[in-house]
Amino acid sequence: MSSPEDALRALLEGAAVASLATLEDGHPAASLVPYVALRDPVRLYLLVSDLSAHTGALRRDARCAWTVSEAPREGDPRSNHALTRAMAKATARFVARDEANARGVEAAYRAKYPIAETLLGLGDFHFVELATVEGSAGFVQGFGRAYAVRGANLDALEHIKTR
């Protein structure tokens, strides 16, 4: 089994989608969003359409939260309760294309998602950076392996033990 730090890094780099929670008209709303994760510091970057409800919600209120999890394993009756997952509260910031290019966001997105070429050609798509609120991140590597996560690169993990 890999270390919690390695498992968290692999999860953030390897998962295809994140669950995004936003506030829409005063109510929580959730959606699935493709993303890329870049380091130094860790940020999740989304490519969102003006046609999506979460885009308008993030423009009105930058507070949000995300969850990234591994896929359930078929035939594993415990997997739905013990999925490896990371979650955090975040603040969203829309990023101009020139900044996305300079930071390597666009290149990373193109490398991860073949459809990016098409989407980036549409005028209603924008990059959004999700910056984790310090002290709000968590990571679960399975039963009995829950961690509070800190640090700019989400690399300071503290095991949460039951009492």
Image (spheres, rainbow, N blue to C red):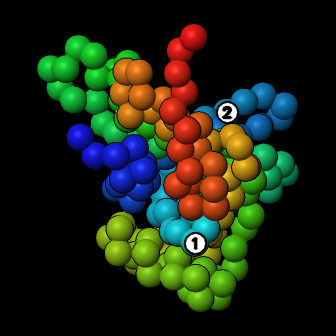
Q: Residue under label 1, please give it.
A: 40
- What is the x, y in percent for residue 130? 65, 58
Residue 27 or residue 155, whichever sits in front: 155
Q: Is residue 108 left or right of residue 48?
A: left
Q: Tag 2: residue type?
A: Ala
Residue 103 vs 84, above or below: the answer is below
Check the picture and name the quadrant holding the N terminus.
top left
Q: In the image, what residue occupies the spot 59% across and 88% down?
A: 102
Q: Which numbered disc covers residue 71?
A: none
Q: Quadrant of the C terminus?
A: top right
Neighbourhood count class around disc 1 (C-alpha, 10 Å): few under 14, some 14–19, many 20 upward:
few
Quarter of the image holding residue 66?
top right
Mark 2 Cα-neighbour bin, 10 Å: few <14, some 14–19, many ≥20: some
| Percent of width and height locating residue 16 | 37, 53
User: What amino acid is found at the position of numbered circle 1 in the picture?
Assistant: Asp
Residue 156 placement (x, y as % from top left): 56, 50
Query: At x 84% / y 31%, what residue is drawn?
Result: 26
The residue sitting at the left extreme is: 75
Count of numbered tags: 2
Question: Which mark's residue is nearer the viewer, 2 or 1?
Answer: 1
Of residues 163 and 74, which is closer to you in this image? 163
Q: Choose the circle earlier in sequence order: 2 or 1.
A: 2
Residue 87 coordinates in the image, percent (x, y): 56, 39
Q: Secondary structure at mark 1?
A: loop
Relative side of 106 to 65, left or right: left
Q: Is residue 146 visible?
A: yes
Residue 82 lies in quadrant:
top left
Q: Nearer the viewer, residue 18 or 156?
A: 156
Q: Are marks 2 and 1 in contact (CB under 8 Å)?
A: no
Residue 58 visible, this orientation: no
- The residue indicated by pointer 2 is 29
